[in-house]
Image (cartoon, helix red, strand yellow):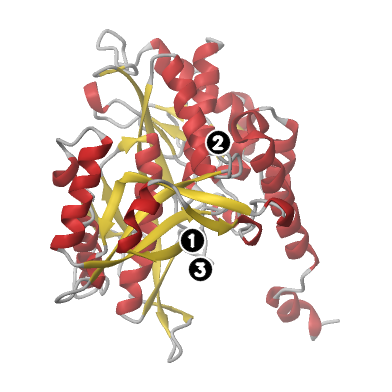
């Protein structure tokens, strides 16, 4: 629901009444109850607005055994509990006398307990862990995407939508009109849009929205990806959040800006410090550096993710931090005070945002709880350092493949501790199967280079 509608509404009864008003005002006939699978892929079941009472009470059931990473067939009955604050009328469905709306939902067991296989519930647990320490988690993600032309059947081709570069306007930026409509749709759904522009690579774009609490930011990220793909389709384009869809140009990242608040105060800000960072901020950074190898499989979950995390394309692959250096894995943006935050630059937009924000926050919490000491910042250009120089400075690299990342996940502790046994086991099994499928497949590169020669 738009921010204005819910800004002064606090109790559940009042929210429900506002939702009913909006349904009547916009003639909403269908309600889409949305949730995500273990990979963060959006799913939904659709009911009529006449079933709103059952929806609100969490009585809509679905078959969990048909969802990737969910329940076995002998325990397949699961229920959807909508987050009422996520109600939105879908602007592209609005026509005279008709529209559709959606809720984002968490998943429950038949006994009413929260289902442990739901990744939205995983993030809730990390939010609760932070709250026990007095912290509220604030997250500002930045998701890049590519636009490709589609064929006569609507399937994506390998032809990019334009040849423009970073910040270039029309006529070179042929995606301006698409981004404008995406912006309008997002705004109508309650997003606060801060910037929209063409990115570095041909056909690559970014639309930035305002930060939110961790759960809200994950909901916004999930909605954002869906809206971008939906609007692009109207223009006979395919929007992809695949990390590296084109060889030889930059891939797409999902930089994650995170800070902890205590009440209305930013716990990461200390005006007396040289970098205006608090002890908690330094400990948070140390926790990320300590755990990043162990959670890279979550923040960069595809075989393709590791085609982006290579030197030469602005993607950080070296484990270091800096106050401003964009070649470092962790950067501290220039804005301070309430805007003080830690930016982790390795995640990509194929990642499940609920799991991604959970493991990043959990790693930072570990650093704070254990009072870890942060190493010295690296302010040199790491991308152009020699291997010997990186060795002198003790700069390690992120895992170089999905297989290596999964091995680090299994060797570390943060994965199982944060994801819980069910999601952890399902995630590891899925990623091992994905790697094995890739490892044993014969690829076009092999045919091109070997078939005629040998």
User: At numbered mark 2, what does the secondary structure look like: helix, strand or loop?
Assistant: loop
**Residue with the mark numbered 2:** 113
Question: How many angstroms separate mark 1 from mark 2 (CA)?
Answer: 21 Å
The outermost residue toward the bottom is 152
Residue lying at 14% horizontally and 35% vertically, measured from the top left: 8
The answer to which of 52 and 64 lies nearer the viewer is: 52
Q: Nearer the viewer, mark 2 or mark 3?
A: 2
Locate residue 439, reporting x and y percent.
77, 62
Residue lying at 23% horizontally and 64% vertically, measured from the top left: 168
Q: Quadrant of residue 280?
A: top left
Locate residue 78, reporting x and y percent.
57, 51
User: How many marks can you see?
Assistant: 3
Q: Residues within 10 Å of mark 2 (few under 14, many from 20)?
A: few
Q: Nearer the viewer, mark 1 or mark 2?
A: 2
**Residue with the mark numbered 3:** 246
Residue lying at 63% horizontally and 57% vertically, measured from the top left: 68
Q: Earlier in the sequence, mark 3 or mark 1?
A: 1
Q: Is any part of residue 315 visible from this angle?
A: no
448 vs 121, left or right, is right
User: At numbered mark 1, what does the secondary structure look like: helix, strand or loop?
Assistant: strand
Q: Earlier in the sequence, mark 2 or mark 3?
A: 2
235 vs 113, left or right, is left
Question: How many angstroms separate mark 3 from mark 1 (CA)?
Answer: 27 Å
Q: Nearer the viewer, mark 3 or mark 1?
A: 1
Q: Residues within 10 Å of mark 3 (few under 14, many from 20)?
A: some
What label sits on residue 43 in the rendered view? 1
Locate residue 160, reporting x and y percent.
40, 76
The answer to which of 131 and 334 lies nearer the viewer is: 131
Locate residue 418, reporting x and y percent.
59, 31
Q: Earlier in the sequence, mark 1 or mark 2?
A: 1
């Amino acid at each position: 629901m738009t921010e204005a509608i819910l800004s002064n509404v606090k109790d559940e009864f009042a929210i429900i009444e506002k939702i009913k008003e909006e349904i009547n005002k916009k003639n909403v006939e269908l309600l889409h109850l949305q949730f995500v699978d273990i990979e963060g892929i959006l799913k939904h079941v659709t009911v009529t607005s006449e079933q709103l009472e059952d929806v609100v009470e969490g009585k809509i059931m679905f078959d969990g055994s048909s969802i990737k990473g969910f329940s076995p067939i002998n325990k397949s009955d699961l229920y959807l509990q909508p987050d009422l604050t996520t109600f939105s009328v879908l602007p592209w469905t609005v026509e005279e006398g008709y529209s559709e709306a959606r809720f984002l939902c968490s998943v429950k067991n038949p006994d009413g307990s929260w289902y442990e296989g739901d990744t939205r519930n995983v993030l809730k647990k990390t939010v609760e862990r932070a709250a026990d320490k007095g912290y509220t988690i604030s997250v500002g993600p930045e998701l890049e995407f590519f636009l490709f032309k589609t064929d006569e059947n609507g399937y994506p081709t390998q032809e990019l939508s334009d040849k423009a570069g970073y910040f270039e306007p029309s006529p070179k930026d042929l995606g301006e009109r698409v981004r404008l409509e995406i912006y309008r749709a997002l705004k109508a759904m309650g997003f606060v849009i801060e910037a929209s522009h063409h990115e570095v690579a041909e056909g690559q774009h970014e639309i930035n929205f305002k930060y939110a609490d961790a759960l809200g930011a994950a909901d916004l990220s999930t909605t954002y990806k869906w809206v971008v793909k939906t609007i692009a389709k109207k223009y006979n384009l395919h929007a992809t959040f695949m990390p590296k869809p084109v060889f030889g140009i930059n891939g797409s990242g999902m930089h994650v800006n995170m800070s902890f608040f205590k009440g209305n105060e930013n716990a990461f800000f200390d005006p007396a410090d040289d970098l205006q960072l608090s002890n908690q901020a330094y400990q948070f950074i140390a926790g990320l550096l300590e755990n990043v190898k162990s959670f890279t499989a979550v923040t960069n979950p595809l075989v393709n993710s590791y085609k982006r995390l290579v030197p030469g394309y602005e993607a950080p692959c070296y484990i270091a931090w800096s106050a401003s250096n964009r070649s470092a894995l962790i950067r501290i943006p220039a804005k301070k005070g309430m805007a003080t935050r830690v930016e982790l630059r390795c995640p990509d937009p194929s990642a499940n945002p609920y799991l991604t924000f959970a493991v990043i926050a959990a790693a930072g919490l570990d650093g704070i709880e254990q009072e870890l000491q942060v190493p010295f910042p690296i302010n040199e250009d790491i991308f152009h350092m020699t291997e010997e120089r990186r060795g002198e400075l003790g700069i390690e690299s992120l895992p170089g493949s999905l297989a290596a990342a999964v091995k680090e996940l299994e060797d570390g502790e943060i994965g199982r501790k944060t994801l819980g046994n069910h999601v952890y086991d399902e995630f590891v099994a899925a990623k091992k199967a994905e790697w094995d499928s890739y490892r044993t497949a014969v690829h076009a590169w092999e045919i091109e280079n070997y078939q005629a020669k040998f």
